[in-house]
Amino acid sequence: MTDTRALAHARGAMKIAEVALAVVCLVVYRHYNLSFGGTDTAAADRYIVGMVTFGGMLLVTGPLLLAYIRNPAGIVNYYTPFLEVIYNLIGFVLFLTVGGLVLEHYKGHLKPLESSEPGVALGAICLVNSIIYLIDASLAIKQGTE
């Protein structure tokens, strides 16, 4: 049975924010044709890290959100809070890394780049999402100790 009241709780709101911000990151990245920076092989590595972060965390957080909506009271029966803590900490580290890469590329130059405003916005959104993942991890730890 679906219980949309779960979305009003802090954990549901965190999941919605994480998914929404990851989608916003993808849209901003693609719409403005942004880069993660670097030259030659470093640019390819940065691209892989960025795309894996956006897509991978959507693939992890989206199903967690759906499971939370489907059965919020019994979600602990399907996985342990420890597993969600790991997912959230990985999301924190990945979005923090990508946000830093993007900001370093668009804000770290002596001369402003042509598309620096959307790039700085993308970096800031990534950093905000990393903080949300960290808060979500702390809430999952709290749930695990109760």
Image (cartoon, rainbow, N blue to C red):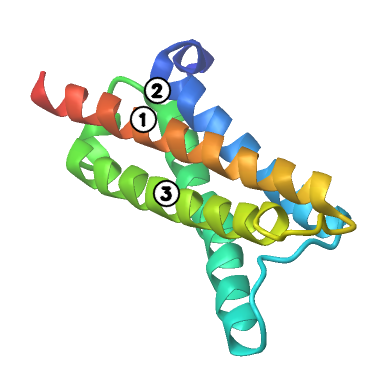
Q: Amino acid at mark 1?
A: Asp
Q: Residue furthest left?
A: 145
Q: Position of residue 113 (x, y in %)?
A: 83, 59
Q: Looking at the rendering, which quadrant does residue 1 occupy?
A: top left
Q: Are marks 1 and 2 in contact (CB under 8 Å)?
A: yes
Q: Amino acid at mark 2?
A: Arg
Q: Secondary structure at mark 2?
A: helix
Q: Are marks 3 and 1 in contact (CB under 8 Å)?
A: yes
Q: Nearer the viewer, residue 112 or 50?
A: 112
Q: Amino acid at mark 3?
A: Gly
Other-residue count near label 3 (Cα within 10 Å), few / some / many at <14 / 14–19 / ≥20: many
Q: Looking at the rendering, which quadrant does residue 70 occupy?
A: top left
Can residue 1 be seen in the rendering of this structure?
Answer: no
Q: Position of residue 85 (x, y in %)?
A: 26, 41
Residue at the spot of label 1: 136
Residue at the spot of label 3: 91
Q: Looking at the rendering, which quadrant does residue 24 occupy?
A: top right
Q: Would residue 60 be found to the left or right of residue 81 on screen? A: right
Other-residue count near label 2 (Cα within 10 Å), few / some / many at <14 / 14–19 / ≥20: some
User: Does residue 127 sit above or below 14 in this rendering?
Assistant: below
Residue at the spot of label 2: 11
Q: Measuring 20% from the left and 23% from the top, which residue is drawn there?
A: 143
Q: Position of residue 135 (x, y in %)?
A: 36, 28
Q: Measuring 46% from the left and 40% from the top, which residue is drawn there?
A: 130
Q: Measuring 21% from the left and 36% from the top, which residue is drawn there?
A: 81
Q: Quadrant of the C terminus?
A: top left
Q: Secondary structure at mark 1?
A: helix
Q: Nearer the viewer, residue 121 or 145?
A: 121
Label whose residue precedes the other's in the sequence (3 or 2): 2
